[in-house]
Amino acid sequence: MHPTARHLPVGDRALMVELGNTIDPEINRRVHQLDRAISQAQIRGVEECVPTYRSLLVYYDPLKKSYERLVFELKDLEEKLNVLTGATKKKVIEVPVIYGGSYGPDLNYVAEYHNLTEEEVIQLHSAREYLVYMIGFIAGFPYLGEVADEIATPRLKTPRLRVPAGSVGIAEKQTGIYPYESPGGWQIIGRTPLKLFDPEKHPPALIQPGDTLKFKQIDSEKFSSLF
């Protein structure tokens, strides 16, 4: 039995559907189910949906759809979620990563923080499949979870002004990838040669909410050939 969703107005052109109050894979799965169901239903007036960890922000045109009517239609969809969306295939994206050294300047810190070797950190980080809970912070940045407790590490006390594109980091129990150079405070343990965000493509983000990621360790030669 799923908890009843909460519907909250966000200004005069958006509505927030809260499907839970914790970071949980099942709640996040239903967020993405509702996102797909709205897209399939092609509800008049709905312009865009933005999924997060536990909620879905729905932008709409108030001249085409009233708030009250939209809530009614969304509630109807929520009751039929499993029927409308059907079974979805898990999409697993393999992400090559070179760990440590200049590519992962914080790998040694993460290892020492947990009394592990660098290789043990790499093995723990690359052993899991990670759910893409949401995209945020900057365009194309995937929030992935969750890393093993053995390598969950706090953010940097002082964020860096420049983090290279493709950097793979850890922040508490989350892991993520910087799609392009930007400031950031995550513990950087490696880098991928993949281009995560390209505004010339559609969709511009290589990784989408609801996808599953698996990191694969590579060496410098392989990194250079893929870069």
Image (cartoon, helix red, strand yellow):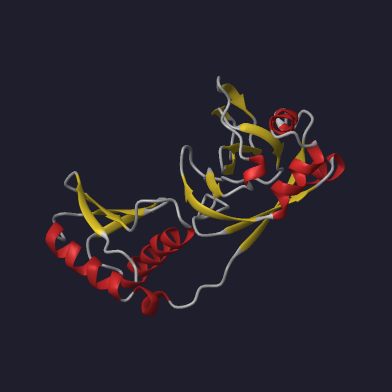
On the picture, is 139 further left or further right than 169?
left
Residue in the foreground of this view, choosing between 170 and 201: 170
- Determine if residue 93 is in view: yes
Of all residues, the one furthest to the right in this rendering is 221
Q: Residue at x 26, y 67 (%)?
A: 43
User: In the picture, which quadrant includes the C terminus?
Assistant: top right
On the picture, is 60 further left or further right than 170?
left
Image position of 104 with respect to 40: above or below: above
Q: Residue at x 26, y 64 (%)?
A: 4
User: In the picture, which quadrant includes the N terminus?
Assistant: bottom left
Of all residues, the one furthest to the front in this rendering is 115
- Report x, y in % for residue 91: 59, 65
- Report x, y in % for residue 70: 19, 63
- Determine if residue 227 is in view: no
Q: Residue at x 48, y 41 (%)?
A: 139
On the picture, is 17 further left or further right than 103?
left
